[in-house]
Amino acid sequence: MYQLQQIKLIIWDLDETFWHGTLSEGGITIPDTHADLIRRLTDAGIVNSICSKNDLAPVEAALTAHGLWEYFVFPSVNWMPKGERIRDMIVDMGLRAVNVLFLDDNPSNRGEAEHCCPGIMVEGPEVIPQLIQDVKTLPAKDKAHKRLNQYKVLEEKRAERTHYASNEEFLMESDIRLTISPDCREQIPRIHDLILRANQLNFTKLRSTERELETLLAEDGVEAGCVSVADRFGDYGIVGFYAVKDGCLVHFVFSCRTLGMGIEQYVYNHLGRPALDIVGEVISDLSDTRLPPWINQSKATEQTERMTVGDLRQHQVLIKGPCDLYQVFAFIDQTELMDTEFTYTTDRGFVIESTGHTTHIVEALRLSEKQKERVVAEVPFADLGMYSDRIFRNPYRVVVVSILADANLGVYRRKDTGERLACLEGLHPLTDPACWEKYISGEYYTAGFPFTREILRAFAAQYEFIGVNSPETIVENLKQIRHALPKDCMLAIMLGGELYYEKNRFEAYRDRHLVHRAVNAAVRCWAEGREDVRLIDVNRYLVDQRSFYDHFNHYSKPVYYKLAQEIATLIRTHTGKQVRHSSKLKLVKARVRQIVAGVWRLIKGKTPRG
């Protein structure tokens, strides 16, 4: 049975659950008690959403006619499987599955939700009468519907985010304003509610009572603050609280509504990074010592001369590619001159490895926005970020790309209109039914995406596999990229390693050194004599097996350090800016961390994909 006190969100099925009847088959009836329940839940601060297999327009029309559409946020109305959709909704709303109740008359849908969202509460419509009675006992503490409106702001932000090439660009234009007030005693009820409800961004997990908070705030030497946030989408109110006692953070807690905005990182660094004993799991990394430049931009510019949005558009260097360039970037100082586009994880939790794939760079230039959006809408493991066209929109002086992904990822083409996308290992085509069971079970690498037979069948019906890029295709793509860049821009290309890796355990990487050898030869032939192309050849630094870390595409820190030296020199030459590679001390520290991590992986028996 559901636990009412845990519920922050109820996700409703519609046909034969929220209403009687099936919308696509004729008339429906919404019981008055159900409509009243939605309003009572909202008054109590519990948010409602929809996951229904229907068409959106008639659903919206039916709920609008009953004055109920405005009470739902993040509605998911389509014909796709419900499990993945519910998981995505929970992630988008910054919640945990254990705080969500899913109501559906279909046992299969409930089971699917439990499989995709471990810990979620699921019930059939038979519990609704009991839910109606239980909700009557809850205080109507949110008559102004602040919580509902806050999630509507998140909904608007999520839609707006898709129009930007990167999350940082979106944040820079969000006009995020953060204030810290030391006057916390008047806010004790809000603070108490925050520390009781927050889990994902509650770093100390100390569940103080209101009386204990009063005592703490009255103590001499305790530094405390309430954190409020607003941006161009709305005012979030108090979203964080901290209390420092004897140099240590007793409380450090934030609302999940600001997840991904860097609020906790900003506050921690603003406080001077006091001692913090993190209890349990949190989903934010506080290791970055910089103040996020998108927060309080005007003040940051006045006080620390940080770059504004306008300055960012004048960045002179773009580094775009997978793990090899990401590791090199760690050894380059003064990175405020640069934009980066690396392999990234989407909000839905799966990895996009193809941002630097030459096919995607070419498609970013060739396809219209409508075509890109169509691909992403119909391919659930695609993301608009993989078609970022920032490389062509900004007047860069240096662009650094890597061709590692081209030698690995499979390329697919939309059958009727020709749009292309690259994803996952080309050795195992997604369109081949013989591969499906191993993608579904996770035996084949999935980049974190939960494949189902239905998803794979739909993809194979619309897209055809055209293989892994050949050396000739890669060169042709590079020609198009070079032609589209400004004439005074230097295109630097990171080549793949040609040294055989003796410890390879992955079928897809067998003889990869020979593939790289053929690709590199074709690229060298094309680039020879060109003044606007520079090759960054890792093979100058791959000496023996000690040059590898734990994977054919993962090198030891000294290799990345030498590559950073070469790239820093290239940037200095072509921008006139004094960009430096990091000191050897940083290399030593990084090498020690890599060795420790390697020993740990050896103990665990795990090696990551490249």
Image (spheres, grey):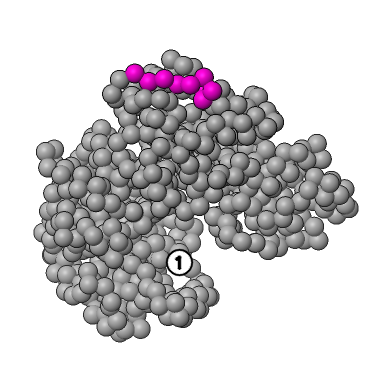
Question: Which residue is drawn at the image coordinates 13% and 62% (left, top)?
Answer: 471
Question: What residue is disc 1 on?
Answer: 331
Above or below: residue 247 compared with residue 84: below
Q: Where residue 21 sits in the image (x, y, percent)? A: 36, 25
Name the residue type under label 1.
Phe
Q: Which image quadrant is residue 548 in?
A: bottom left
Q: In this orientation, which residue lies closer to the viewer: 145 or 525?
A: 145
Pointer 1: residues within 10 angstroms few (<14), some, or many (20+)?
Answer: many
Front in this rendered view, residue 13 or 544: 13
Tell me if 226 is positioned left or right of 133 in this view.
right
Return the x and y of residue 588 as percentages of the image width and height.
Answer: 50, 78
Where the N terminus falls, by quadrant?
top right
Specify the segment rendered in magenta: 27-35
Q: In which quarter of the image is the C terminus?
A: bottom left
Query: Is residue 144 positioned above or below 380 on the image?
Result: above
Residue 226 appears in view: no
Query: Horizontal and vertical percent for residue 492?
Result: 28, 59
- For mark 1, give the secondary structure: loop
